[in-house]
Image (cartoon, coloured by chain):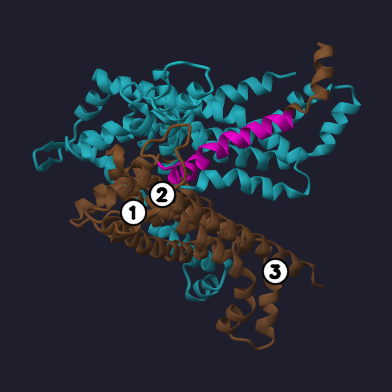
Chain colours: A cyan, B brown
Amino acid sequence: MTAAALETTAETPSPSRRRAWMRSDEARGLAMISPTFLYALALLFLPVLIVIAYSFWTQNYLDIDRTFTLENYRQALTEPIYRDLFIRSLWISLTVSVVTVVFSYPVAWFISFHGGVHKNLWLFLITVPCWTSYLLRVLSWKVILGYGGVMNTGLISMGLIDKPVTSLLYNSNAVVITLVHSWAAFAILPIYVSLQKVDRTLIEAARDLGDSRIKAFFRITLPLSLPGVISAFLIVMIPTVGDYVTPRLVGGKDGVMIATAIQAQFGKAANWPLGAALSVTTMVLVSLSAAAVVFALKFTIRRIK
Amino acid sequence: MSVLLRRLRVIPVLPVYVAVYFLFLYLPILLLPIFSFNNAATTTFPLAGFTTKWYASLAGNSVMLNAAWNSLIVGISVSLLSTVLGICAARAITRYRFRGQRTAAGLIMAPLFLPEIIVAVSLLMIVLAMGVELSLVTVILGQTVFCVPYAMSVLVSGFEGFDRSLEEASYDLGETAIGTFRRVTLPVVAPAIVSSLLVTFTISLDEFILAFFLSGTEPTLPVYIWGQLRFAAKLPGVLALGTIMLVASILMLTLAEILRRRAERRTQLAHALP
């Protein structure tokens, strides 16, 4: 669709008009963006198309059978192991995104309304930890939550517990905590941007007309910052569903997510079509659940009177 | 209810909450440096005394040094490539209006909204389907897809507000296109470009999933670290290496931020001139 749209704009009839068009903003803009656009087309769009194509094929040892089949999707959706992994991955990514947005909103609000002249410094301090190595951050949570880790040995040396708590690491809670920590900045930034756009005089007007501080927040600030909340939610939920490192390092047996199964199809198990079908199913399922939550969110906010 | 509200106003709830939130963000990251200087092979409290032996052990580790060299090559290539591509896209978006602009920008920014494993798997499939051998080159090509959105957002904020009339004035006064770029455009946007180079280098240095899928037999530092995590005895060395990477990342990000702000101030200044 995108390529077609670009082509139609490139078709201009007479030579003189074509020359005029070549000098126009439109032609220059297209020429300017084309290297980046073509790069993304070749190394993002095309590969995704190939994944979709593979998901309808079958693999016989080293050969690929290119006859159309839905067998991979049948396996992906009905085999209990994949079904459980999908449910758990969606549940974890949903929990992580909701928790991240809820806990980050007050911080974004604080920076936007009380950040003073150093707003940029606040935002920078928020983003620094999130831009350091993801692998190292997950590793440090493993160090914190482990059996002989910081939390347990710290609590023992303070005399609060007398033997290590085993339930901290290697379960889905550990995965949720680690992911919330990793994605905090990605939630704060979009919420902050939309809060900055909220017209402060509207809040003053609501206060002057007798709304309490809290009521004014729920009736003015929150609905107006909804676009930021929604993009924060999407930018956390969609990538976390396919997270590979966190479940592998802190998830243990109870925290395995779908990415591990996808990776296995490209490694040891070597069934590309099934791996492709699992990838496509993940994307479709996470998009549907994200759309459902966004719809529910908009509906609830609209009901606030 | 009203008593509770009055009390809430006395205690600064929100500032306290923000402080706790910052602790939550920073404490886990501070643990790595603390234990990298700890004179014990385990990560337990109380600490066992100060040592720099884990750092000394890194110097003689040829596998690690090789991975560091790979990371450096990949990081420099990715930052150059993605910044050049980012400049094209950012310039097109801030300077021109054209049909298909939103679609093109949407596709370029898409990696931000996709699970990284799906980007990695799809790249792996196309690379292997074309019969290309996995190497540092495939890592560079893959990480560039992932870094362009970040380069673009840094550059767009640097290019936005750049006054076109400055360039036009330069043309009118007889300067060539190249001369105008070198003497008018470049000085204004240079900080944003350097900032983009630093940010993308940092992302590449820390990026794991794409490197893990696409690196073949030549590991980058994160891939090397991943391999070491299986051995509990290697943990202190990994912590020391991680601390060095952490400090390098934070230094580069701070420098990038300072430059980005300078770029912002410069474009604002150019605006303020009559």
Q: Which mark is residue B145?
A: none
Please state which of the two labelled residues, at mark 1 or mark 2, is closer to the viewer.
1
Which residue was labeled with disc 3?
Answer: B163
Q: Are marks 1 and 3 on the same chain?
A: yes
Q: Main secondary structure of the magenta part?
A: helix
Give me the chain letter of mark 1. Answer: B
Above/below status of A279 relative to B142? above
Q: Position of residue A95 (x, y in %)?
A: 49, 24
Q: Give the class, few, some or many, for how many residues have Cα within 10 Å of label 3's Cα (few <14, many ≥20).
A: some
Contact (Cβ within 8 Å) of mark 1 with mark 2:
yes
The stretch of residues the image draws in magenta is B14-39
Separation of marks 1 and 3 at Cα, in angstroms: 53 Å
Q: Which residue is mark 2?
A: B240
Residue lying at the far top of the rendered structure: B1
Secondary structure under tag 2 reads helix
Which mark identifies residue B57?
A: 1
Going by the numbered disc 2, the residue's amino acid type is: Ala
Type of amino acid at the residue the image marks with label 3: Asp
The image quadrant of residue B70 is bottom left
Characterize the local packing of mark 2: few (<14), some (14-19) or many (20 or more) Cα atoms within 10 angstroms.
many
For the point 40% across and 45% down, which residue is it?
B239
**Is B215 above or below relative to B44?**
below
